[in-house]
């Protein structure tokens, strides 16, 4: 009984919601995403295609063909962005030697190139958001470094989106740093992103959210569907790095649909809906497509919330195929089938989410769920030491649903009692919000009481 009274005390404050979550658009976010240029995105992809192949093992001496020329081009582009008026970007390079492996017959130098937009909150100097596209490409054979491999959609699209978002956000002043990185060696086994994720972890960087944009520029699917409205967000529900203790708690709390990556995917979907007309992102309840992967998996393996953004309908004749015509059918990932307007629309939705999260207060931590075997759900959490947090959003959905159904706004508080809401029947998470409506990632219960 004593324990129960203490518990009641901890949950004593009962607030009423003061409204639904703010849906107004921030003019600053609108200005940033409206500056994204379809022409520039198309130009970047055209330039990447012009290098013939960007295979990881292709030549490095030529100025016009191969992986060396393409990465020097990208490094120069990111460097130029850092010299724009008012730009706060700092060029970034992650250079290493990949040792021989299944798709790397001999040791080869790989270089991830990009830029960092430094965060301004000194207390959060080690927190970051990471956006990647992979700039390497491949032909039919994973080891063919000589044949043309234009890689317009896979993954010129993601690389161009990353570069263009870096340009659009160059002068912004987020709370936490944003890394914009064109990563190497994806087609050889996620080699570049694996190195980058491990490097950031070793540097003590806490990646709040990572997104790989990979195959995000084709709107004519092999299934015959033309679609420039939808795209897919892939995320794992159960963290790849889950410990046995975390597993025990997840099973007790029923959290299998609320991994940190999944919350980040929902965040992107929600923010994109607010800012971009005629764009509908699907939160896919899978780590990725069947038996396939991308660079988000490298970050998930290090325990970071990581997702992948992809087009809705893929065309497999244009992926990992030698450029050729056979039996009247054309193969290859050429520029003609890249839809820059669609990639630009995806950049707007994703850019709004990255902007908002990078400017948001710290999230609550130690979210604790109580009230089992009772009619009232009891939630409490530790508020961050972040003066910008002015309110709380409570996320709710019935336990038979996978998408948040209600977002209620509360005054800044560290505890809530939900009368006549049995915790068995709903799922909850809480986020912090600042005066401008910038919202942290929702934190779901990680403790039971
Ligand atoms: Zn790819």
Image (tube, helix red, strand yellow):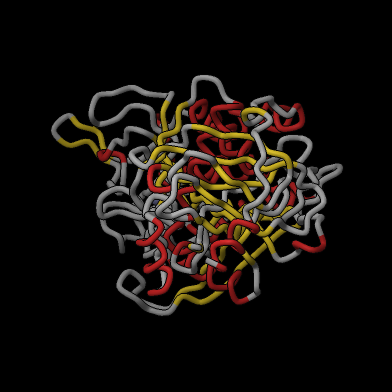
Could you tell me how many numbered marks the image carries? 0
Q: Is residue 399 visible?
A: yes
Q: Is residue 330 above or below residue 250?
A: above
Residue at 39% x, 65% y is 240
Q: Is residue 50 visible?
A: no
Q: Is residue 315 above or below residue 290?
A: above
Q: Is residue 294 left or right of residue 163?
A: left
Q: Residue 219: x and y, percent?
A: 38, 28
Q: Is residue 134 left or right of residue 37?
A: left
Nearest the viewer among 268 and 1 is 1
Residue at 25% x, 55% y is 291
Residue at 30% x, 54% y is 292
Q: Residue 46: x and y, percent?
A: 51, 37
Q: Quadrant of residue 425?
A: top left
Nearest the viewer among 438 and 281 is 438
Residue at 54% x, 62% y is 4
Q: Residue 305: x and y, percent?
A: 51, 57
Q: Residue 389: x and y, percent?
A: 76, 47
Q: Residue furthest right?
A: 86
Nearest the viewer among 356 and 429 is 429
């Amino acid at each position: 009984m004593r324990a129960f009274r203490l518990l009641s005390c901890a949950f004593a404050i009962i607030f009423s919601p003061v409204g639904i979550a703010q849906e107004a658009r921030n003019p600053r976010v609108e200005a940033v995403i409206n500056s994204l240029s379809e022409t520039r995105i198309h130009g970047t992809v055209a330039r990447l295609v012009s290098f013939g192949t960007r295979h990881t093992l292709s030549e490095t001496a030529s100025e016009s063909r191969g992986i060396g020329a393409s990465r020097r081009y990208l490094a120069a582009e990111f460097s130029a962005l850092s010299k724009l008026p008012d730009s706060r970007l700092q060029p970034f390079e992650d250079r290493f030697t990949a040792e021989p492996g299944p798709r790397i017959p001999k040791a080869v130098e790989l270089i991830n190139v990009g830029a960092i937009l430094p965060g301004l909150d000194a207390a959060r100097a080690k927190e970051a958001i990471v956006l990647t596209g992979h700039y390497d490409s491949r032909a039919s054979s994973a080891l063919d470094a000589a044949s043309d491999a234009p890689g317009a959609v896979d993954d010129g699209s993601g690389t161009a989106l990353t570069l263009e978002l870096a340009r659009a956000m160059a002068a912004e002043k987020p709370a936490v740093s944003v890394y914009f990185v064109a990563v190497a060696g994806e087609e050889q086994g996620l080699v570049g992103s694996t190195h980058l994720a491990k490097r950031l972890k070793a540097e003590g960087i806490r990646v709040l959210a990572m997104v790989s944009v990979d195959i995000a520029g084709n709107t004519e699917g092999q299934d015959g569907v033309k679609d420039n409205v939808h795209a897919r967000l892939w995320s794992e529900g159960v963290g790849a790095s889950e410990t046995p203790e975390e597993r025990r708690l997840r099973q007790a709390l029923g959290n299998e649909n609320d991994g940190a990556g999944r919350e980040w995917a929902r965040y992107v979907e929600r923010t994109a809906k607010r800012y971009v007309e005629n764009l509908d992102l699907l939160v896919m309840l899978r780590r990725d497509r069947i038996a396939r992967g991308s660079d988000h998996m490298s970050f998930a393996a290090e325990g970071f919330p990581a997702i992948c953004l992809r087009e809705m309908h893929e065309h497999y004749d244009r992926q990992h195929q030698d450029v050729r015509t056979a039996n009247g059918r054309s193969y290859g990932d050429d520029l003609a089938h890249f839809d820059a307007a669609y990639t630009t629309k995806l950049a707007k939705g994703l850019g709004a989410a990255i902007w908002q999260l990078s400017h948001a207060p710290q999230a609550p931590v130690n979210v604790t769920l109580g009230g089992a075997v009772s009619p009232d759900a009891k939630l409490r959490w530790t508020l961050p030491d972040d003066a910008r947090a002015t309110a709380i959003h409570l996320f709710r959905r019935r336990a038979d649903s996978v998408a948040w159904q209600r977002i209620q706004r509360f005054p800044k508080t560290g505890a809530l009692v939900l009368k006549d809401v049995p915790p068995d029947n709903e799922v909850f998470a809480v986020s912090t919000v600042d005066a401008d409506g910038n919202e942290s990632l929702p934190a779901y219960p990680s403790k039971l009481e």
